[in-house]
Amino acid sequence: MRQLRMAYPGGELYSHSLVGNTLRGHRSMGGMLRVEPSLIVQVGQASFRVLTGSESGAELLVRVYQAAFELAAEQTGYSVENMTRAIVQTFIKRAEAEGEGYLESVVHKSTRGTAANLDSRTYTGGRDQKSD
């Protein structure tokens, strides 16, 4: 990180964890910030917003992964559907209860959280702050 800082003076350094809805419990954040105090640590939706410049970045990436998994399964004969049927059914039930599609439900649950808890510049630690 120090080498990056020296190579790009005046630039911002980021650490991204795509899955997560709070920095609370982020195991490596403390160590990384001790090495580079100006590092910006982000999780979930905050990361996707910076990386893709879009509010739909997580959904787009999930669709890319889904297509790649389907291609790999087709080429190897592995049945992703058989292995994930019960999990998908659980997500569908949850999504129906919340009135949204299951893919959006999965993405939202695993990436969205209180904005202040997703970015080290606004994170204060401890108890979660109220949702946006």
Image (tube, grey):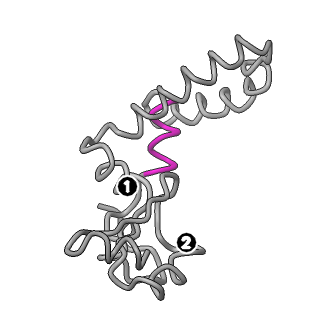
Q: Farthest residue toward the left?
A: 10
Three-letter residue code for mark 2: His
Residue in front for this viewpoint, 101 or 120: 120
Report the number of discs.
2
Q: Farthest residue toward the bottom?
A: 34
As helix, strand or loop, the secondary structure at mark 2 comes to loop
Which residue: 67% across, 26% down?
89
- Secondary structure, magenta segment, majority class: helix
Give percent across and percent down for residue 65.
Answer: 54, 30
Find residue 91 and report its image quarter: top right
Three-letter residue code for mark 1: Ser
Crowding near pointer 1: few (<14 within 10 Å), some, many (20+)?
Answer: many
Which residue: 49% across, 33% down?
62
| Residue 43 horizontal side relative to residue 40, left or right | right
What whole-number distance in Å separates the C-alpha atoms at marks 2 and 1?
14 Å
| Residue 122 horizontal side relative to residue 41, left or right | left
**Quadrant showing the N terminus:** bottom left
Give the residue at mark 2. Answer: 26
Which residue: 44% across, 34% down?
61
Q: Which of marks 2 and 1 is nearer the N terminus?
A: 2
Give percent across and percent down for residue 17.
Answer: 49, 58
Q: Are marks 2 and 1 in contact (CB under 8 Å)?
A: no
Over which residues does the magenta segment extend? Answer: 103-111
| Mark carried by residue 47 | 1
